[in-house]
Structure formats: structure tokens, C-alpha cells
Image (tube, rainbow, N blue to C red):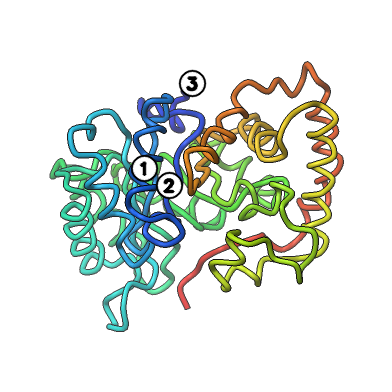
Amino acid sequence: MKYRRLGNSGLVVSVMGLGTNAFGKRSDEIASTEIIHHAIESGINFIDTANIYAGTESERIIGRALEGKRHEVVLATKAGLVKGDGPNERGSSRYHLQRELEDSLRRLKTDYIDLYQIHTFDPNTPLEETLRTLEDMVRSGKVRYIGASNYAAWELMKALGISDRLGLNRFISTQSSYSLADRTPELELVPMCLDQGVGIIPYFPLAGGILSGKYNSTDAVPAGSRADKDHNFNKFLDQRTIALGQQTSKLAEIHGHTPSALSLAWLMGRPAVATVIAGATSTDQLENNLKSLSIELDSEGLGEELDAISSHYRYVEPFAIYRLP
């Protein structure tokens, strides 16, 4: 396993992380626990979840699976997206974040979170309130580092400026949709993160599985796929993106790789990327993702080819972005 510092912080994370959105939804507790244990044995130390994944079940499963192993991982969770119907069950107010942190700690069976992330920018709460709340969490020992997610570059830069002005802890990382099928972060977010020392944590690194080559059309959905088990995912299916997945598959086959591993290897080599959170619903899928670590893009001349077939995706709408309604 390869490891990198997360942004300019002293925190070191595995270049491949484990995304857990499927735990408790497309992957039951037994399978999810096996995946977590196999990931740790393989050298993965970064596990990412959120307070709303599978209706909080992801956090509960992770908490049980990490009993006796908590010290071996960098555990990251998030809060800020809609949690319930009440007026204070969303956003990044002090009221909401403090309650959600306590609930996450209880579900995860831990007394601290290594990386606590704001799940999306909240236009209704002053950034100073959010950042002072996070500062208090760090000072209390319940949070070690803080990160952002789904922030536009200007929103993230504004938050960093406030932290610097007030002498508060800064966001060390940001999560964004980023893949061969979504290169929009390269326009503003990547340059900003390089300048400010913020690590990028891509989500949807395989465009929800589209870059694995399993989809042939928007109508024919493979059995057991994300689109098959989560019909909300169908909104992401686009013929042009499916065609990119097929191009990536052909390129991978020529060079003796799987399309998933090739796509992940490309992303791991992008500037400012610290760790790529790839999800898995089985240990076999996890093993396939781990093959990305042995791919040398430059020596095989693959980097330029992948750049060429995906260049269009710098200038499209983001593949995914999650914002408050």
C-alpha cells in the first residue's frame, strides 16, 4: 500500500480509501464487515462514511466491525446534508453539528473522529459559526482534523480565509466528484487546493460503476449493479459517459488491466489527490480495486491516452454534486 499526507497536515492516509455508502444498503452487515477487515489487512487505513449513509446503518456497521481495530484506521464521517424533516435536521449550524457529532460517535463506538467533514456548503449558516463549532470540537478532543465536501472553490477559499483570520483550524481536505467522467474539479478546485495545501478526496471515482464497463446502454441495467439496486442512480446514466466507460474498457483490455483498476490508477496520479474512496460490495471487488496500485501509467503510456479520451469531461456539468435544497 502507498500512503500520502492529507493536504499539508501531518495525517497520513492510504492512497486507496474505503467508501462505505453501500454498507447496510447494497451490502449487508456480514459482507460489509468482511470488506472492512480485508481492507485493513490490505493496508487501507482510511475509511469514509457519513451520518446519512443507509439511514445511519453504515456508521453502525462500521462501529461494530472496528471493535478492537479502531486504532488501525483513520476514520472519517460527515454531517450537513438533510437528516430528517425538522428545521434543524440539516445544515452546518452549531445546533445541528454538535448533535450529529454525538450521534455519530455513539454509532461508531468511538470517542473521537479522525476527520470530521461538512457534507455540503450551507448558505444559511455563517461560515464563522460553522468554523468556530468545528474548532470547539477539535479542542474538545472529539475531532482531530476537519474537512469539507461539495464546496465550490470560492466557498472553500472563503472558509480558509476566515480560519486564517480568526486563527482557527483549517479544512485539510475536500471531497468532490472526480473521475475520468468528471474532470470539472481541474478548472478551479484543483489549482486552489494545490495553492492552499488542501488534499482532495474524490468520490464517485468510477462514476458509480460506469467506468467499470458494465453498462452498455441507458436501458439495459446489469443485475446487481448500483442502477439495479438503487433506482435513484439512473439519473446518472448518460450514453456519452457509458461510451467513455466502454473506451476505458478497451484500453484496459489492450494493456491487461481491468477498467476499474485503470480508472482508479489514473485518478490516484492526479495533482492534489490524497486518497481515493472506492466503494466495494464484496472482497472480490475490493481486490480488483487494489490492482490499481500496481499500474504504472507513465511507463505504459496510458496517462496521455486516458487524458485524451476524457478531456471533454473538464467542461461539462459535474457528474454529481450534493447541495442543500
Sequence-first disc among 3 and 2: 3
The disc placed on residue 1 is 3
Q: Residue at x 45, y 28 (%)?
A: 14
**What SS does tag 1 mark?**
loop
Q: Nearer the viewer, mark 3 or mark 2?
A: 3
Q: Residue at x 36, y 61 (%)?
A: 127
Sequence-first disc among 1 and 3: 3
Q: CA distance from mark 2 to mark 1?
A: 6 Å
Sequence-first disc among 2 and 1: 2
Q: Which kind of residue does numbered mark 1 sit on?
A: Arg
Q: Is residue 279 left or right of residue 299?
A: left
Q: CA distance from mark 1 to mark 3?
A: 28 Å
Q: Within the image, what quadrant is residue 36 found in?
A: top left
Q: Residues within 10 Å of mark 1 (few under 14, many from 20)?
A: many
Q: Position of residue 202 (x, y in %)?
A: 55, 45
Q: Residue at x 83, y 23 (%)?
A: 301
Q: Position of residue 117 (x, y in %)?
A: 36, 51
Q: Position of residue 84 (x, y in %)?
A: 31, 78
Q: Which residue is mark 1?
A: 170
Q: Nearer the viewer, residue 70 or 249?
A: 249
**What SS does tag 3 mark?**
loop
Q: Which residue is mark 2?
A: 160
Q: Which kind of residue does numbered mark 2 sit on?
A: Leu
